[in-house]
Image (cartoon, rainbow, N blue to C red):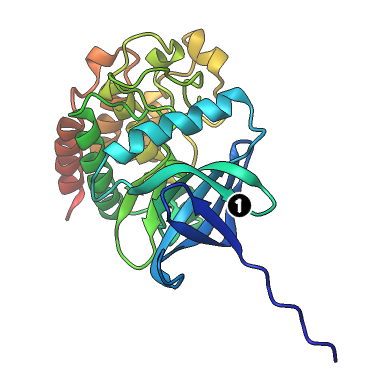
Amino acid sequence: MQPQPPVQRLLLHSATGTTYELGRELGNGGMGKVYLAQARCDNTGTSNGHLVALKILHPNAPLPARRLFYHEGTLLPRLHHAHIATCRERGRGTVGGMGVVDYMALDYIAGETLEELLRRRRQPLPPTVTLGIVAQLVAALGYIHQRGITHCDVKLNNVMLERATPNAFLIDFGIARAPDVLGHPVTVGTPQYMAPEQMNPHAACDGRADIYALGVVVYELLTGKRLFPHRKTTDIRNGLMLVPDPAVLRADVPEPLAQVITGCLQPNPNDRFPTVEAFFAAMCKAVQQLQP
């Protein structure tokens, strides 16, 4: 039997001097690829054991995708919170067979998104479990809102749950709006979660847009089904499907929680909860009312 050739290791040599050994592919899209990677010590070449999710921008990625990538790369390294994935570094490096690439190295979260959790369970989450997840999202959102940043894409797929711990992480800041970061991306959000004011990327948009999306997330966690499954941007532009039918909402969710969700989903931002902390206080009270 002929000996098997050694497995070629794919390495990214960064301009900062860090070397990343690329492992399995975690994701692949129009913007580029995400690999599980391990940082290696510069002087010995041995692994330091730190795992990252290495986002590599495709060299031929279209301009809108590049803008998203660079926007997140500018904003995320400034954020340091227990429930936001840490950006270890960003920069430019070389990979054999790829050439020069732009990359971001984020702390690797071994787990699943809320979307994947609901799909795997095939049933909704109890109110107390939902409250525990939402508490962590509120902490992350409160942190960025205090800094004038709006995430603009809070949804099930942008929340990661760590498998080994009960920790939840807010991810994907590609379309976040920040007062001191120039060049907002062209993308305005995900229609099923988008607040009406996000339709205009140049209009005022603050943390209350994230509260709108959070109301949608809470409904979906409590029911296991979509609130606005077929909503498109044109529907939002025409003022359609902005608020669910109250009768349907009350049929799906206990009345105290239905009131909280309704308080998030008002078309006018001034009619919503003013802060995520106010929203969370109301949700805590609602869940407490459900206890025997």
Q: Is 112 situated above or below 213?
A: below
Where is residue 26? Give x, y as percent. 56, 55
Q: Is 143 situated above or below 10?
A: above
Nearest the eye: 205 or 24: 24
Q: Is 18 situated above or below 80?
A: below
Q: Quadrant of residue 73?
A: top left
At horizontal 40% and vertical 58% (from top left) the residue drawn is: 109
Where is residue 14? Give x, y as percent. 48, 50
Where is residue 76? Give x, y as percent. 34, 38
Q: Which residue is mark 1?
A: 95
Q: Is 54 situated above or below 78?
A: below
At horizontal 23% and vertical 13% (from top left) the residue drawn is: 270
What is the three-letter code of the residue carrying label 1? Val
Where is residue 6? Give x, y as percent. 70, 77
Of all residues shown, which one is farthest toward the right? 1
Q: From the viewer's perspective, is 273 left or right of 73?
A: left
Q: Quadrant of residue 172?
A: top left
